[in-house]
Image: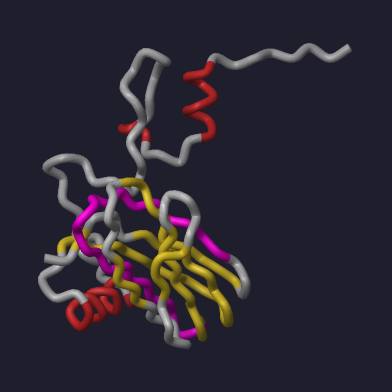
Amino acid sequence: MRNIHLLPLSLAVILFSTVSPIARSQSPEAPEEQSASAPEEGTPHTLGGESTGYLARTLRTQAATHAAGARPMTPFVEHSLRTNERIDLEVSVEGGQCYVALAVGVPSVRELDLYVLDPFGQQRARDGTRDAAPVARFCPTVSGTWKVQLHLFNGYGRVAAQTLRLP
């Protein structure tokens, strides 16, 4: 017979959470966890992050074209994807405000698709182009946690994304 040891709930949350260590709950009595993509009060995100690389520069150019004056609501995130892989990025939105989700890929990324899903998993916006720089605008009527989904349809390599709040 094998011994099974149950971990305390707080330890299980730490082991399986994707939230940064600062935002993790240390005990069941601690405040609720914050989403990794939700900005902390007074801690604004930087457009394109601190990076000066290709993806950050391309995303900044894309933002200047499609979202002039918008303010970053999520951190700049980078991932490696292959054909038909996808990632979901959470974003906390406020009802009555408009947002734009931007993504970019390196030159080996031929077609990157971007979808915006409401809290119920329903698609509310999407990019309609066949390129590696998708853009989708959306204006939720209620506050909540939405998802920006990136799907690499054709190609491989690094991709980056960030969601901005329109003025």
- Residue that appears at 20% across and 83% down: 65
Q: In the rendering, at what x and y percent does residue 92 appear?
A: 30, 48
Indicate yes or no whether the magenta region holds residue 82: no
Task: Please tell me which residue is depicted at 34% across the width and 52% down the height of the picture.
Answer: 91
How far across and how far down the image is residue 128, in percent? 43, 83
Q: Is residue 164 left or right of residue 79?
A: left
Whether 10 is drawn above or below 89: the answer is above
Q: Locate the C terminus by quadrant.
A: bottom left
Q: Classify residue 69 as left or right of residue 163.
A: left
Residue 97, above or below 69: above
User: Residue 133: image x %, image y %?
Assistant: 38, 80
Q: Main secondary structure of the magenta part?
A: strand
Which residue is more in the foreground, 9 or 11?
A: 9
Q: What's the coloring here?
A: secondary structure
In the picture, residue 100 is in which quadrant? bottom left
Q: How many marks?
A: 0
Q: Position of residue 41 (x, y in %)?
A: 15, 40
Q: Which residues are magenta?
A: 86-108
Q: Quadrant of the N terminus?
A: top right
| Residue extending furthest toward the right | 1
Q: Is residue 100 magenta?
A: yes
Q: Residue at x 51, y 66 (%)?
A: 80
The vertical placement of 137 against 22, above or below, is below
